Image: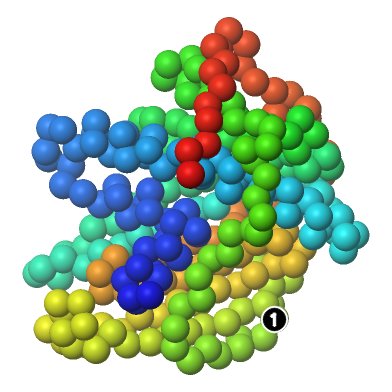
């Protein structure tokens, strides 16, 4: 697999692309509509299945280890791209997560005024995509959600350094740093491209609590967990909004 494909998959797995996409030319009149469509298209049936299986895997891992199951947090992503003349283009996005003791999850993200809410409910063997702008809920349920093997984010090539353990956002995390170089000409680049990836993973949350990507193609991207709160999450958090039409969707492989 080419390095560019690995990095693209890594960005998708870590939900970074919405932040990177918002660094487009905002002076173009059709950019907002294009970016809204891009944001909406990310939530395909396959993506919803991944969200559901991630919730199931998280429940299995944390329950088996006796970790807290109910908590909320925000995942904040800052992107900075260097421009000519010493200028820089910066943006920030936030995705909010909520989990309860029964394994249900709720993810809220927005891009260019378009909000998407994903509710994964293992107790009902279903996952829902809430689309507020058209008052509609898309539902994927049943055998379509079963996955033979969980989706794993790709491992970036290059030497990896163990950074040990430290506390981030109030939880212990283990860190690692990878650095690798794309040779000149490998992907149309005139000079070698040096990529650096630093991640900190917390077993208390079964997730990456800090991610730093330094890549000439995408700029500098930093994501981190913020506003982490442990404790019971109200059942209403995972309820579908009243008055919304529910439409079942199919998974097309």
Where is 33 relative to 172, above or below? above
* Residue pictured at 48% horizontal, 38% vertical: 252
| Quadrant of the image occupied by residue 142 | top right
Give the number of marks. Answer: 1
User: Position of 135 compared to 73: left or right?
Assistant: left
Q: Residue at x 54, y 61 (%)?
A: 224
Q: Where is residue 251 in the image (x, y as percent from the top left)?
A: 52, 36
Q: Which residue is drawn at 32% across and 87% down?
A: 181
The answer to whether residue 184 is above or below residue 235 is: below
Res. 233 in view: no
Secondary structure under the numbered disc 1 in the rendered image: strand
Choose between 15 and 81: the one closer to the eye: 15
Q: Is residue 243 visible?
A: yes
The quarter of the picture where the N terminus appears is: bottom left
From this viewpoint, which residue is outermost toward the front? 253
Q: Mark 1 points at which residue?
A: 165
**60 over 211 or under it: above or below:** above
Q: Where is residue 244 in the image (x, y as percent from the top left)?
A: 55, 12
Query: Toward the viewer: 171 or 193?
Result: 193
């Amino acid at each position: 697999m080419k390095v560019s494909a690995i990095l693209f998959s890594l960005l998708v797995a870590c939900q970074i692309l919405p932040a990177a996409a918002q660094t487009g030319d905002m002076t173009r009149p059709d950019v907002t509509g294009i970016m809204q469509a891009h944001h909406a298209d990310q939530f395909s049936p396959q993506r919803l299945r991944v969200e559901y299986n991630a919730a199931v895997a998280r429940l299995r891992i944390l329950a088996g280890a006796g970790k807290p199951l109910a908590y909320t947090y925000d995942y904040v992503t800052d992107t900075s791209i260097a421009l000519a003349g010493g200028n820089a283009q910066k943006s920030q996005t936030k995705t909010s997560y909520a989990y309860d003791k029964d394994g249900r999850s709720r993810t809220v993200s927005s891009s260019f005024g378009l909000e998407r809410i994903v509710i994964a409910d293992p107790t009902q063997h279903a996952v829902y995509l809430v689309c507020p702008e058209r008052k509609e809920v898309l539902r994927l349920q049943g055998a379509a959600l079963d996955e033979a093997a969980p989706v794993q984010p790709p491992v970036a090539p290059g030497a990896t350094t163990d950074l040990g353990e430290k506390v981030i956002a109030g939880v212990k995390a283990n860190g690692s740093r990878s650095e690798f170089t794309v040779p000149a000409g490998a992907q149309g680049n005139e000079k070698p491209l040096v990529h650096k990836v630093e991640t900190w993973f917390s077993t208390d949350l079964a997730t990456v609590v800090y991610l730093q990507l330094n890549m000439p193609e995408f700029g500098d991207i930093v994501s981190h967990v913020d506003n982490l709160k442990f404790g019971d999450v109200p059942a209403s958090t995972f309820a579908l909004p009243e008055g919304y039409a529910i439409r079942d969707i199919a998974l097309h492989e």
